[in-house]
Amino acid sequence: MKLPQNSTFKILPIGNLLEHWKMECYIISSPIQIQAKIERKVVDRIYNTLCEFFGLNYFRPQRRATPIHKANWLHALVANHQSIGCIKALEDIVSLLDYSRSLPEEIQKMLAVLKGNPDNLRSFFFELFTFRMLDFNKVPNLKKVFEGQQEKEGVCTIGGLDFLFECKKLYMPHIEKLDIRKAVLSEIVLQLQHLKFGTGIIIYAKFKEPVDNSIKDIFRDKIQNFVNGLNRRTSISQINYHDESQHGTLSVINYSEADAFEMENLKKDWDVYFKLVPPPIMTPGIPAKFIAHGDTKFSIERSKVTDKLIAALKQKRKQHQSSAFENRIFFFDSESFPEVRMGLFQYENMLDANAIQEYMNQSSSKDLLCIINRRYWGKELRINVNVFCKNELNPIKKIIEGWDFFTGLPLAYS
């Protein structure tokens, strides 16, 4: 079964992302509004804490196409200032930073060092999330312990049994194909900045198999050829551009609401889609404000998602096969918000509980697998927790399922 995966992300504004986020969030938190979407004190707390810990320069946007695994996920959060879910995710990061001050100095130093590596920093924030969850639920634990020369996330005691626990973040497999789509979309944004004319347009690209990294350069040239050709024209009243080759097609048409609706809702065949929406009225000689929006399409089979999960579990088991701890808990996290590097379980039905439980039953290890699926979409934060183990550990499973996983998350939202 193939499940559709649409990735939508904001076009990064010019200037400092955090400053832009504060400006926009001051609007939706204004006390003069009948019902503000968020409290002003929440906006100030997020802004001040992120400034203090990261510094403003940390939030300068990445202009060129950056590989997904190197992209700064915090940039995606602050760029989506209209998403209450993203604001909630930012506030939880601030809460985790506050919580980290109660931890040993070695952990705080590690957090500071990881600021320069966004991917490792994101993994470490999940470790902090797990530490806080254990502390809040009064689970006895030791953090960042050593067994011989190998550092472990920690050990904890549940139901009278001692467990080694480890944390891991999980992302969608075959993400390199999404990376190609992201790169082409980013190139569209960059090249359109060289247009001499302000006009509403719709751009869409369709790739032909095989799709590999060469597509990035090929479509960069296609986009550049379109922009250069349009800049040579004396009139742009009518745009109907198609550049087809053995690698795929780039098409550009004038913007209209009808065409945009058809492209977005009637399953039109495209891999990358971009629209530049003009203002209702354009006055010659007066700068106009356009709205930009980009989408990509990406699909993955559910069996591939399960395969990646089981591969990650096997890797963790192998990593700790010489541990003296008989019982182990592996906390796996799938975190989703409007960005390109998607968590493993974008939708609840992508988790094949039967296949995972069958694999656990066949194992000789005394392990528990706790999958935490956090989805910061819309107005409500959703956290789904699934625990898998052999029957003999079901009493421990029931204890974990009774924990509060919303620890530290305030409810100051309308």
Image: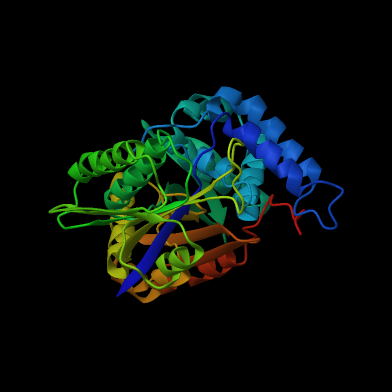
Image coords of residue 354 (percent x, y) = 36, 76
Quadrant of the image containing the C terminus: bottom right
Image coords of residue 412 (percent x, y) = 77, 53
Q: Looking at the image, is 256 positioned above or below residue 123? A: below
Q: Looking at the image, is 300 positioned above or below residue 190? A: below
Q: Quadrant of residue 173?
A: bottom left
Q: Residue furthest left?
A: 246
**Position of 409 compared to 352: left or right?**
right
Quadrant of the image containing the N terminus: bottom left
Image coords of residue 126 (percent x, y) = 52, 45
Q: Looking at the image, is 323 positioned above or below residue 202? A: above
> In percent of the image, x 43 and y 73: which residue is there?
349
**Position of 46 compared to 263: left or right?**
right
> In percent of the image, x 51 and y 39: which residue is there?
12
Q: Quadrant of residue 95?
A: top right
**Position of 146 compared to 86: left or right?**
left
Q: Is residue 320 visible?
A: no
> In percent of the image, x 20 and y 42: which residue is there?
218
Q: Looking at the image, is 286 positioned above or below residue 200? A: above
Image coords of residue 390 (percent x, y) = 39, 70
Q: Is residue 346 visible?
A: yes
> In percent of the image, x 59 and y 37: which residue is there?
287
